Every structure is written in C-alpha cells, then in structure tokens.
Image (spheres, rainbow, N blue to C red):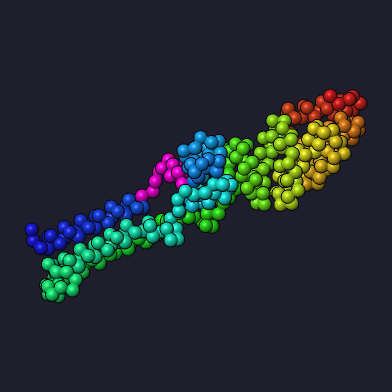
Amino acid sequence: MSERLRDTVYLVFMTITVVALAALVLAAPDRDDRVQELGSRIRCPVCEGEAIIDSPAPMARDMMKLIRQRVDEGASDEEILSEITSSYSGAVLLDPPAEGATLWLWLAPLLALAGGISVILWWRAHPGGTPGSAKSATPSSPRRRSRAIAGGLLVTLVLGAVVVAAGSALQDREGPGGGAADLDSVDPSLVSNETMEAVIGANQDDPSIDGMRLALAERYFRAGDYRSAFPHYLAIAQSGTAADETAHTALVRLGWMAYDGNGEVETALELLDQALDIDAGSPMALYLKGLVLWCGADRPEEAGDLFQAVLDQADLEDETRTEVSDDLAAARRGEGCA
C-alpha cells in the first residue's frame, strides 16, 4: 500500500470515528428513555434515598406522571428537573446536572480523544522518534508534513464542531428562563390530593399556586368535605393576588358553605355579595344568594327577584333553567324552601 493511500485511509478512519462519536453524544433520547432517566435522577421526598422511578409511594407516582406530561409537552430536561425540585418539598437531585463545573465531565471524553489524535499525528510526522530525541529532529519530507498538517486540521475542525454542537445541545436542554418552576403548568388531574397538599404547603407564598389550590378545594367541595375545602378557599379569597375568576369562585363556595354547613345566614350573604362585586351577573352567586334569602332569612320576595335575574340570562342550560323556574314559582306562591 502506497504512503499516500495509507495516509488517506487513516484520515478517513479517524473522521468516521469522530463523526460516530458526535452522533452518540448528540443523539436525542426517545420519550420513554427521557422519562426513565429523569425519574432516576430525582429522590422521592417520602422515601429513604430512593429514586421516584423505583418508589411505589403515591407521591412518587404523581411525580412520574408529571414528568411524562411535561416531556410530552416538549419541556427541556432542566425545566422539568427545576419544576419538580421546586414544587415538591424534599425532592432533590441524586446526581449533578450537566452544567457549570460538571459540564467538563461530559466533555472530558472529547478532550481526551483530541489529545490522543494530536499525539498520533505528531508521531506520524516524526516516525521512530520521541519528543526531544535526536531522531525526532530529523525533518520529514515536505509532502508528508503537508499531509499530516492537513489531516490534523481536518480532525481539529471536526472535533471543534462536535464540542460546539455538544455545548449548544446542552445549553438548549436548559430552556428559556433558566428552567424556573412553573406551577401553572402542572395538570392537577394527574396529581393526588396528598401530593397537591404537599405542593401547596411548599409554595404558600407563590401566587401561581392559586390554580392548584382552587382545583384541590373543588375536589373537596364536590365530595362534601367542607372542612378540608374551607382553608383553601379562604386562602384564595384573602390572598389579594388571585385572578378575579378564581377569587369569585372561592367567595361563592365560602358563602354557600357558611350557610349550608354552619347555618350562618348573614356571613353567607356577605360573602356572596363580595362575589357579586366581582361579577354582578354571576348566575351561581345570584341563585345561591336567592336560596339563602328564601331558605335562611325567610325573604321569598327578594329571593324571587334574584331567581328572575338568573332566568333573564340567555345562556342558561335547560336543566338549570327548569330548576330555577320551579324555585321562582314556589317563592312567588309564598311556599317554604324545599
């Protein structure tokens, strides 16, 4: 084999090796691999040093559901890890992220390969010698030196492209905003009551927790568990930062629970009036205030006026319209509240 052909084969082999390494470094894991890898990096808050992927605890299962959801939504690994560790009190990473000082651990194999190639290229340019030896000082032919330099430049360029691309890929994984937690992105339907209570407890001062707090309170309310729902509705009503719609819902629920749970007529009317200050045409607030006036204060005429205001709205569902119409007719006839 001629010297030129041997050098060409050598350069092609080294180029293929570097490109293959680049493909391995930059290959994007599929959805299931990402979920498994992320789950193995987070310690379960209620377990003894166990990753959430290996834990049967309900909280760990909820955390894995959240990871799957966020992966499907296209969130980066760093966004998901930051969100989970910020949202769940006691959750921490089991290994360091690929950033800062630990980034060198990811790039070390590439640097080692570059060093090895440099040594090989030097050796080929100085056959039979070692650095500092007499023989190594013997000049090689201009053609041989040119091919060695060209090969070294080619490999260096490819390695540089790999390192830049790897750094860019790692930076992209961090996502915009440095991966700050976004509690509004958490789907409450994927999370148990226990986990939602833990998340809320760990983020008491975060305004974005109001959505999750309302979702949990609504679960309790629909189950008839007023005792558990009350503190969450109250926290929303008193926060001063909740959206109007969220605050309105909390006040309506508090008003009805005050009457239905404790028989507190005046407190119920006051809370429902606060809800109507936010949304004067709210059919639910109007109807519940009418019921409290009719059933609790024995003021059927005022209740009838509120029932009529509900019926004047065009977008009522048929079932609701029928129920309110029956109550209006009974109140107008002076009948007692059923």
Say which residue appears at 85% left-offset and 29% top-offset.
Answer: 328
| Most common secondary structure along the magenta stretch | helix
Magenta-highlighted residues: 27-41
Who is closer to the viewer here, 152 or 49? 49
Who is closer to the viewer here, 51 or 61? 51
Say which residue appears at 44% left-offset and 42% top-offset.
Answer: 36
Horizontal arrangement in the rendering, residue 265 relative to residue 242 (left or right):
right
Residue 11 at x, y = what percent?
A: 20, 60
Outermost residue on the left side: it is 1
Say which residue appears at 89% left-offset and 28% top-offset.
Answer: 332
Outermost residue on the front side: it is 48
Q: Is residue 29 magenta?
A: yes
Determine whether 124 is above or below 323 in the image: below
Q: Is residue 52 magenta?
A: no
Q: Name the image quarter holding the C terminus.
A: top right
Q: Is residue 330 among the parts visible in the rendering?
A: yes
Residue 63 at x, y = what percent?
A: 53, 41
Q: Is residue 158 among the parts visible in the rendering?
A: no
Residue 193 at x, y = what percent?
A: 62, 37
Say which residue appears at 66% left-offset and 39% top-offset.
Answer: 216
Q: Name the image quarter holding the N terminus.
A: bottom left
Residue 100 at x, y = what percent?
A: 45, 61
Determine whether 183 is above or below 295 in the image: below
